Amino acid sequence: MAWVLKMDEAIESGLVHDFDSSLSGIGQELGSGAYSMSDVLALPIFKQEDSNLPSENETKHPPFQYVLYSATSPAVKLHDETLTYLNQGQSYEVRMLDNRKIGDLPEISGKMVKSIVRVVFHDRRLQYSEHQQLEGWKWNRPGDRLLDLDVPMSVGIIDPRTNPAQLNTIEFLWDPAKRTSAFIQVHCISTEFTPRKHGGEKGVPFRIQIDTFKENETGEYTDHLHSASCQIKVFKPKGADRKQKTDREKMEKRTAQEKEKYQPSYETTILTECSPWPDNAYVNSSPSTTPTFTSGQVSTYSVPDSNSSSPNHQDEGTTQFVVEQLCPTATIQEAQQWLHKNRFSTYARLFSNFSGSDLLKLTRDDLVQICGSADGIRLFNALKARSVRPRLTIYVCQESQHARGISQLASLQDNENGEGDSRAIYVYHAIYLEELTTAELAKKIATIFNISPNQINQVYRQGPTGIHVLVSDQMVHNFQDESCFVISTVKAENTEGYHVILK
């Protein structure tokens, strides 16, 4: 037992001595020249980690940079996109900077590039109904534009253009090698696109987007180079300054810990890279070719031929609203052409990647949410080829056919079995009326007799005791739907026309 205690004491004293020795050398090891950081980074573990990091050449480097000279809001959280307040109609500088490295895009050196500046909606909900929103703004502000270029203040801008049909777009050429500044003016206010309720509504955010293109082989600026955008809100004059001051005062009242969750306010706004704005080629162009549809895929709306037994029968003498039914096998290009042909060009860009089957899979609720109530229901009905129900349907039979049917029925009743055959029916024609006028009725009746409507002088209805009552527009309005009439004709005196009698 004593031997064990001696061994423990010896071990303990040895450990204490070693520990004291190690501590005595710490000051010397941390002295200058003991080691260098480059030696540490040269260790294998650091070499392996360094090899996994992207090299400077591999890092994506945008060719251009656009800077909006307006301060960002301080009331934006760290991981959110910056927000910049602008005053309505005030000119703001957008500096166009060449950000290329040596050797980047040599094909544009010494040449012009084209930039298109747009003011668009930030919210996806408003993007779906952008056309309707802008048309409503245009109606309330005739002659105004949403976006303008202040040409006298701009520097380095060449051939600036605005399209009267695109109130939110400007475009111009510029030389990346020279100083270029575009001074823009936004005339729409964020609250103009919010539902009016009780006042103090929160305005919707917009986006300023710039897309830059280079010249192609044919001399057109269609080859995309770079796109960037930023989020803005537009206030009435001086409203942006007051909003910026309010946000700054709110942030000053927050604690230091709360302030750490928000971005600082920067003097300028740098537009961040984004996807290019979708191509608008379909919006203003009429397709030179139309998709091929079989005759079985055509359904007509409104007034059909009176000789038909179906409202889908066509009549060359009747105004038709033809809607070609979209085939599920239609390609993306054919679906785009179908949208244009049926007056849905506004949504061609939105459905630019939809085939026929994709469009047909959309429900009524989907289309209403995307296109709004009016156009959503109209597009859904067009996709499903729903015919519009006529206001009035009547059935008519020529008196000669009616008499022939009676004689056939009588002969059948005199057969050996003494039973009538219900298959001996009179042949009636359906007439579909939309205007509910005597002129429309006469026109439809004329097609039954294969005569000109001008040959029908008067239309009468046989009343009690066989009297002939002149048919007026009011009488047509009071016809019961799906009424049946037998038509007879009487030669008009001193003319080549006829009088038509409805019995």
Image (cartoon, rainbow, N blue to C red):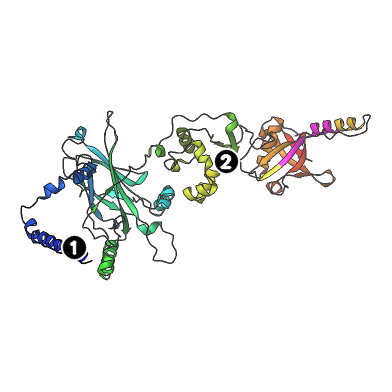
Which residue does the numbered mark 1 point to in the structure image?
7
For mark 2, give the secondary structure.
helix
> Could you tell me residue 309's position as x and y percent?
70, 35
- Image position, residue 259 (x, y; %): 26, 65
Residue shown at 37% from the left, 57% from the top: 204
Residue placed most toward the observer, 248 or 49: 49
Residue at 54%, 44% in the rendered image: 380
* Front residue (pair 497, 375): 375
Residue extent of the magenta highlight:
394-406
Q: Which circle's residue, 2 or 1, is located before the other in the chain?
A: 1
Q: Is residue 468 left or right of residue 472?
A: right
Is residue 157 at all visible to an observer of this figure?
A: no
Please state, as top left, top right, bottom left or bottom right, where the N terminus lies in the image.
bottom left
2 vs 1, front mark = 1
Q: Write down the residue under mark 2.
A: 384
- Label 1 secondary element: helix
Residue 178 found in image quarter: top left
- Give how far across and how far down residue 306 sits, in percent: 68, 36
Say whether residue 325 is magenta: no
Going by the numbered disc 2, the residue's amino acid type is Lys
Q: Is residue 376 left or right of residue 239?
A: right
422 and 426: which one is in front? 422
Q: Is residue 12 above or below residue 177?
A: below
Looking at the image, residue 263 lies above or below residue 483: below
